[in-house]
Image (cartoon, rainbow, N blue to C red):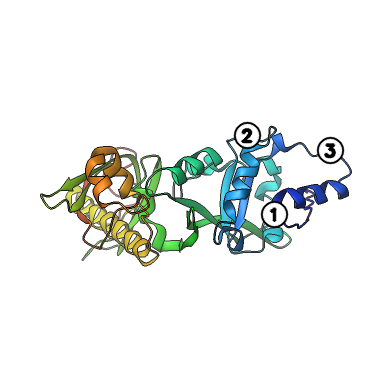
Amino acid sequence: MNLLEVGYAEGKTIEEAIYKLYRSSDQEIFWGHMRYLIFSERAMENERSIPVIDTFIRFRETRYHIWVYCTKDPINELMLVTPILRNSMTASKLSNPLSTNKQLSFIQPINLRELIIGLNEPSHEVSIPYVKIMKNWENDKEQTEETTFSGIGILSKDGVKGFITDSSARGNQWMNEETSRGEVTIKIEGGERDYLTIDLDHLNLEVKPIVNKNNQVQFEVDIKIQGILNGFKGKITTDEVRKNIAKQIEKEIKETYQEGLKLDADVYRLSEYLYRSNVKVWKKIEHNGKIPLTEDSISKINVDVNKINPGRKTFDETIEE
């Protein structure tokens, strides 16, 4: 079983806390082995996160490829969670989030380099994976704890804007070009099976800013995606499945966007899309890097499910009645 040890120190600055930690360490601490950084909610308030980020990017031993997370759970408890299957800490999802991200891209990982770029470019806000402790695993002796990616925290240069978690954060995966695989569960009206879960991959995203003569901006979202149908019962058609997938993805995108508006956050970085497309208009309407956004700023969401793979080459039921 893995043995974990967590050191604790506090100081007026992050550097002071680190030097206090050195006093209690039996060996030299090599910061080049540092895999991830977790911000508590308090550490993200106001501008507290900025000097922390600055410290780690300036120190000669640390690397830019340090993964960044946020949480509301106690940091020491989160750090003491051991990976399932008795793996080493280097195989944990916090140390290597890309491993699980290939199977399900619910929340896109972000490293220090990407965090700095996001804070320096419009809208100067970054979505950081939100981590919490779950107790949905168990072994032959007891129930075990494991970390899970549960949503996002919105960090700006001025501090944390808030958190979007669980089902409210699902739209984030469809508005991210790096998404490799996701899933939706749809309801089939009048069928023998009420719900159906479809794997989705090969995401292609295009966000087009549309500027009218009064320099008012709206955005059209075009998504192309492919689906893989696993288990189903009864007679269904590909057109029916496509229609329901598109409807569910559109619903999730709108819900996450509306949650972002409640936090005054540009959760999909629409300001950056305008900045890249039409910087002259962006300069006229931006304030602190962000353009005004309303519920109507996303005018259209077009979802094209261009292929449905039935799995093992047939739409016939595996077990027939």
Tell me the crowding category of disc 2: few under 14, some 14 to 19, or many 20 or more residues within 10 angstroms, Cα based: some
Q: Element at badge 1? A: helix
> From where the camera sits, is residue 309 visible?
no
Q: CA distance from mark 1 to mark 3?
A: 20 Å
Question: In the drawing, does residue 176 fall left or right of residue 10?
Answer: left
Front of the two marks 1 and 3: 3
Tell me the crowding category of disc 3: few under 14, some 14 to 19, or many 20 or more residues within 10 angstroms, Cα based: few
Q: Position of residue 249 (x, y in %)?
A: 29, 54
The residue positioned 20% from the left and 52% from the top of the image is 218
Q: Depth check: give the residue in front, 145 or 284.
A: 284
Q: Position of residue 42 (x, y in %)?
A: 60, 63
> From where the camera sits, is residue 4 visible?
yes
Locate the C terminus by quadrant. Answer: bottom left
Q: Depth check: give the residue in front, 27 or 158.
A: 158
Sequence-first tag of 2 and 3: 3
Residue 317, numbered label? none
Q: What is the count of numbered marks?
A: 3
Residue 79, numbered label? 1
Residue where numbered disc 2 is placed: 63
Q: What kind of residue is marked 3? A: Glu
Q: Position of residue 168 (x, y in %)?
A: 39, 63
Residue where numbered disc 3 is placed: 28
The residue positioned 59% from the left and 56% from the top of the image is 48
Q: Element at badge 3? A: loop
Sequence-first tag of 2 and 1: 2
Q: What kind of residue is marked 1? A: Met
Q: Position of residue 53 (x, y in %)?
A: 60, 46
